[in-house]
Image (cartoon, grey):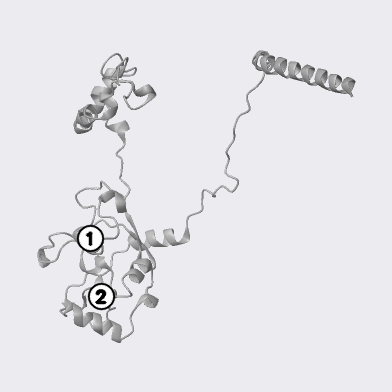
Amino acid sequence: MKKQYTHGLATAVVAFALAVVVIYTWPAAISNANVIPVEKIRANKHPKPEWWVAPDQAAAVELSHQTPVFVEDVQMEDLLLRQQRLRRIGLGIKDIEHSYLWLESPFVNTFENTYGPARFMHSRHAAALGGDCAACHHYRPADTNASETVACKACHQEAFKPEHRGRIGLKAAYHLQCMGCHEDMEMGPVACEGCHDENVPDHGRLVKLPPDPAPTQVTQECLRCHDDAGRDMLASAHWLWQGPSRYTVEHRSSVGCGKRTTALNNY
């Protein structure tokens, strides 16, 4: 029994010694070997064909480029009476022809084109309003043969239209209706980026730099247009960093290095 125990102990010691040798020599062996690193490939298993466009998006974009006949006269009707009348005739979510809309129009981009079009989930908004179509379609054309719920751009088009100076343009109509409702209901975005993607200008035509610019030249060129952003940067925690925080390692409060001491700030 003692022999077996001794033999087992000796085997364990040898195994441990081999493990130590492997642990200390394996990294060196790997580093000395001519190992070609494996290139990571994250290809899409089901790539979207270049020609494919979402059918509802294509239809919405096509619809957005159509300009309806301008509604000259509207039927003056109290909003509460209009709501009751539309409910009485049964007009609601089931009657929505286009459940998704792409809000893009030259009437909106007349003076500037800073932001991209907004996506508008028509049916979802109608459901959130309990099918109250009059909440947005507050008037109808005076023509009795016209639809009860014409598009916004049928009544609101150019801003300051000479013949209809009392009627706001399409851009103002969208913003007043959408943001006003979002504020009243305390739901939905009220900032520009909440509904729009920002149209970033082509900096290739804006930036003027020599062929091999120095870092300081790049900074100066950026600040030529983005002076406010530069001033904000000077007040940021990143710019004013002074090294280790007193709330981190061993509560150190000493400043050995930082943006305001030894590190470079000009980049």
Dividing the image into 4 quarters, which one contains the C terminus?
top left
Percent from the top left, x then y, of residue 121?
A: 37, 63
SS label for mark 1: helix
Q: Position of residue 186 (x, y in %)?
A: 26, 61
134 in relation to 33, above or below = below
Q: Please name the amino acid that badge 2 sits on.
A: Ala
Q: Quadrant of residue 160?
A: bottom left
Residue under the image location 38 percent in, 58 percent down: 61
Q: Nearer the viewer, residue 85 or 239?
A: 239
Residue, x 68% and y 18% (percent of image)? 23
x and y, in percent, of residue 149 in the image: 28, 75
How many labels were placed on the picture? 2
Q: Is residue 195 left or right of residue 223?
A: right
Is residue 167 shown to the viewer in this render? yes
Query: As displayed, is residue 33 above or below residue 88?
Result: above
- Say what secondary structure mark 2 lies in: helix
* Residue beneath the point at 30% across and 44% down: 199
Viewer-closest of 94 and 253: 253
On the question of residue 209 being in view, the answer is no
Q: Which residue is mark 1?
A: 183
Q: Judge by depth and name the residue closer to the eye, 181 or 220.
A: 181
Name the quadrant of the N terminus.
Answer: top right
Mark sitting on residue 134: 2
Residue type at tag 1: Glu
- Please say if 106 is above or below 239: below
Q: Write down the quadrant of residue 203 in the picture.
A: top left
Q: Within 10 angstroms of label 1, few (less than 14), some, or many (20 or more) residues?
A: few
